[in-house]
């Protein structure tokens, strides 16, 4: 809560400062409607660097269109509400077409200044252009401090990884237990929440950088998300097992090993070798003696295939990213 309040206070001060600076700069240049520069600054500040710059570019192109449309409307129909209405129709149409929705209100407020003075001559056009540029520039500068939050993303990634390890460990125990009454999958709700938070933070970090190739965290979490889906299928297999065949003990031991050794920097090469030994050993097991054992061993076989896929997903990720990890 303290961190949230600190961030809230900092953002409030940042936005206020950007607005005041834009207004003061407009006053220093003796611009008309100088206060509007502050409003433009407020509306220009977005949650991340990339969003701020992308929004600023979109609004600039929209502003050029707004100037052209309003000039035609006002010069042919007069500086009145009817001309403004026609301007709005065509401007909004263009904004919706090019997805400049955020520009509709801000740019139109600047256009109303022409209505107030009743002219669109060169000095007035320059006045509005400078107001726009001062406000947008203040907004961009205000967000230049934003950078990748390494501490937060690592914490969230660790939360996700640790929850997955807990699920694997619990699975190693449950596979030997016939009573599944309290094995209800609630742990996956916690995992889903951790993963969602981590993905959001990874996206924010990516949007606060200009290096296009810094995608390690986003790809890492995509890998974890895929593993979570496989892990849930493994859980459903364990739930279907009604007895505890002898083979379950070996699989239980391997699941426990995975939960203990599996971490973000593990390439899982050794785990895959151990898995292959386990899998080969299973092929030499005696045939089931009754239908119940046959069904449960079929579930164990399916579980092994999913577990192999679970490890392969990490191995493929490791081949691409771990040795050349982006810092």
Image (spheres, helix red, strand yellow):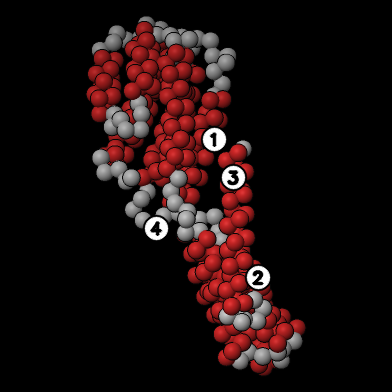
Rate crowding at label 2 as few (under 14), some (14 to 19) or many (20 or more) other CA atoms within 10 Å: few
Q: Name the residue under label 2.
A: 105
Question: Residue sitting at 38 percent across and 22 percent down?
Answer: 259
Question: Residue sitting at 66 percent across and 88 percent down?
Answer: 73
Front position among marks 2 and 1? 2
Q: Which of the pair 178/224 is nearer the observer?
A: 224
Q: Where is residue 135 in the image (x, y as percent from the top left)?
A: 57, 70
Per the rendering, the mark at residue 193 is: 1
Count of residue discs: 4
Question: Residue sitting at 41 percent across and 33 percent down?
Answer: 227
Q: Name the residue under label 4.
A: 210
Answer above or below: position of 164 versus 133.
above
Q: Helix or strand or loop: what does disc 1 sit on?
A: helix
Answer above or below: position of 286 versus 214.
above
Of the numbered discs 2 and 1, the one sitting upstream in the chain is 2
Per the rendering, the mark at residue 6 is: 3
Q: Which of the pair 160/256 is nearer the observer?
A: 160
Front position among marks 1 and 4? 4
Q: Where is residue 67 in the image (x, y as percent from the top left)?
A: 59, 83
Q: Position of residue 197 (x, y in %)?
A: 52, 40
Of the numbered discs 3 and 4, the one sitting upstream in the chain is 3
Front position among marks 3 and 4? 3
Rate crowding at label 1 as few (under 14), some (14 to 19) or many (20 or more) other CA atoms within 10 Å: few
Front position among marks 4 and 2? 4
Q: Is residue 303 left or right of residue 95?
A: left
């Amino acid at each position: 809560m303290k961190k949230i309040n600190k961030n809230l206070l900092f953002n409030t001060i940042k936005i206020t400062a950007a607005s005041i600076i834009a207004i003061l700069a407009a006053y220093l240049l003796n611009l008309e409607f100088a206060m509007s520069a502050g409003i433009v600054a407020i509306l220009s500040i977005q949650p991340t660097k990339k969003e701020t710059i992308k929004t600023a570019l979109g609004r600039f192109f929209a502003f050029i269109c707004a100037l052209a449309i309003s000039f035609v409307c006002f010069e042919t129909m007069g500086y009145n509400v009817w001309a403004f209405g026609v301007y709005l129709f065509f401007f909004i149409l263009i904004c919706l077409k090019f997805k400049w929705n955020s520009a509709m209100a801000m740019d139109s407020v600047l256009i109303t200044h022409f209505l107030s003075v009743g002219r669109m001559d060169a000095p007035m056009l320059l006045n509005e252009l400078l107001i726009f540029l001062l406000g947008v520039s203040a907004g961009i500068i205000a967000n230049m401090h934003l950078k990748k939050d390494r501490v937060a993303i690592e914490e969230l990634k660790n939360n996700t990884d640790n929850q997955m390890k807990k699920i694997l460990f619990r699975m190693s125990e449950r596979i030997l237990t016939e009573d599944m009454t309290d094995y209800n999958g609630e742990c996956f709700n916690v995992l889903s929440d951790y993963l969602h938070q981590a993905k959001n933070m990874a996206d924010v970090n990516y949007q606060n950088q200009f290096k296009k190739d810094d995608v390690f965290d986003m790809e890492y979490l995509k890998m974890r998300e895929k593993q979570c889906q496989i892990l849930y299928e493994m859980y459903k297999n364990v739930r279907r097992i009604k007895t505890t065949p002898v083979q379950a003990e070996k699989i239980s031991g391997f699941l426990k090993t995975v939960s203990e050794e599996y971490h973000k920097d593990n390439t899982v090469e050794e785990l895959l070798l151990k898995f292959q030994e386990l899998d080969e050993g299973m092929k030499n097991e005696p045939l089931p003696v009754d239908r119940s054992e046959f069904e449960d061993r079929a579930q164990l076989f399916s579980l092994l295939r999913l577990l192999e896929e679970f490890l392969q997903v990490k191995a493929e990720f490791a081949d691409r990213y771990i040795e050349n990890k982006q810092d």
